[in-house]
Amino acid sequence: GILRCGCPVEQPGFAQTNSEGRMEGFDADLCRAVAGAIFGPDNLDYRVEYHPVSAFDRFIQLRDGKFDVLSRTTTHTMEREVMEANSGAGFSFTIPYLYNGLQF
């Protein structure tokens, strides 16, 4: 099987293509970890298909089934869980896995 994963494009530290053409960074690693939990630990680079997403189109593509999992810096809000504005759909979120230290 293949896990289709929505990831940012060339966002250093989160998802970027290295000199060998392999995706690396926090979001890319998270996609491989999810694929490993589903399919087992073998050949994870071949088990993940990365789909580039932007901050604007990530929820639209997810709603439309372009990928299975979104791994991109995305804040969990009640609005996005009930009805995200750009896509008109609600989404399920995991527990937070990254804290950046920003506060209001």
Image: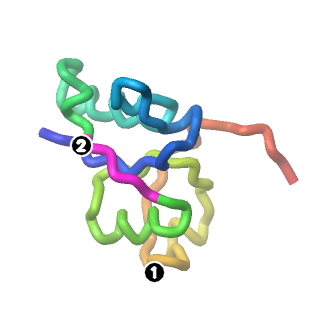
Number of the label disc, if any, that sits on residue 19: none
Residue 82 placement (x, y as % from top left): 51, 72
Point 26% across, 28% down: residue: 45
- Amino acid carrying label 1: it is Gly
Name the element at disc 1. Answer: loop
Question: At 41% across and 71% down in the image, what residue appears?
Answer: 60
Q: In this view, does 68 lie above or below 34?
A: below
Viewer-side residue, 23 vs 36 = 23
**Most distant residue in the left direction:** 1
Magenta-drawn stretch, dominant element (helix, strand or loop): strand
Mark 2 lies on a secondary structure that is strand
Tell me where residue 90 appears, x and y as whole percent.
45, 71
Q: What stretch is highlighted in magenta?
A: 49-53
Count neighbours of disc 1 (C-alpha within 10 A) and say few if under 14, some if 14 to 19, many if 20 or more: few
Question: Label 1, label 2: how many angstroms apart (C-alpha)?
Answer: 24 Å
Residue for badge 1: 88
Residue 46: image location, x then y, percent: 19, 31
State which quadrant residue 22 falls in: top left
Q: Which residue is drawn at 58% across and 32% down?
A: 13
Between 5 and 37, the one lying in front of the other is 5
Task: Give yes or no for residue 98 being in the magenta stretch.
Answer: no
Query: Is 47 drawn above or below residue 58 in the view shown?
Result: above
Please state, as top left, top right, bottom left or bottom right, where the N terminus lies in the image. top left
Residue on which the image places disc 2:
3
